[in-house]
Amino acid sequence: MKQPFQYSHVDSIPWRKSAFAEGVFIKDLGTSDGQSVQLVKFEPNASFPRHTHSGPEFIYMLDGEAIQQGNRITAGSIAIAGKDTEETEFYSNNGCTFLLIYTV
């Protein structure tokens, strides 16, 4: 039987290294019905490789800033990428932390 509700506290979830990029760390906050939520931390000068989104992706920047497709995302900003968009540029010169919701 599927669990209708999931609960956790971010402090109880350990950071793990990204399998795709150096200097990127992730806390897996939860997954349900094909969607996942992560807390993502970029160290200064970290970047993420080119990839295509299998579904919509939502980024809410908590601190620091990143550059996505030439657009600056600062603390308090949200960035949304649609399904099948190709992301060729995502990096942070000074480091950042953001909430990420994406399709698994």
Image: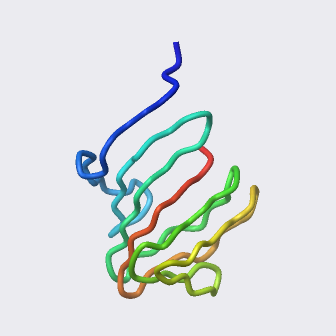
Residue 3: percent from the left, percent from the top? Answer: 48, 22
Image position of 76 with respect to 32: above or below: below
Quarter assignment of residue 57: bottom right
Residue extending farthest top = 1
Q: Tell me what residue is drawn at x 47 percent, y 62 percent.
A: 99
Residue 7: percent from the left, percent from the top? Answer: 38, 36
Rendered image coloring scheme = rainbow
Image position of 7 with respect to 16: above or below: above
Residue 64: percent from the left, percent from the top? Answer: 39, 82
Residue 44 is left or right of residue 51, and the answer is left
Q: Nearer the viewer, residue 32 or 4?
A: 4
Quarter assignment of residue 101: bottom right
Quarter assignment of residue 90: bottom right
Q: Nearer the viewer, residue 71 or 10?
A: 10
Residue 42: percent from the left, percent from the top? Answer: 37, 72
Total numbered labels placed on residues in the image: 0
Residue 49 is left or right of residue 12, and the answer is right
Q: Tell me what residue is drawn at x 41 percent, y 64 percent.
A: 21
Image position of 52 with respect to 96: above or below: above
Residue 15 is left or right of residue 92, and the answer is left
Q: Tell me what residue is drawn at x 62 percent, y 72 percent.
A: 79
Q: Tell me what residue is drawn at x 42 percent, y 72 percent.
A: 62
Quarter of the picture holding the C terminus = top right
Q: Nearer the viewer, residue 66 or 51?
A: 66
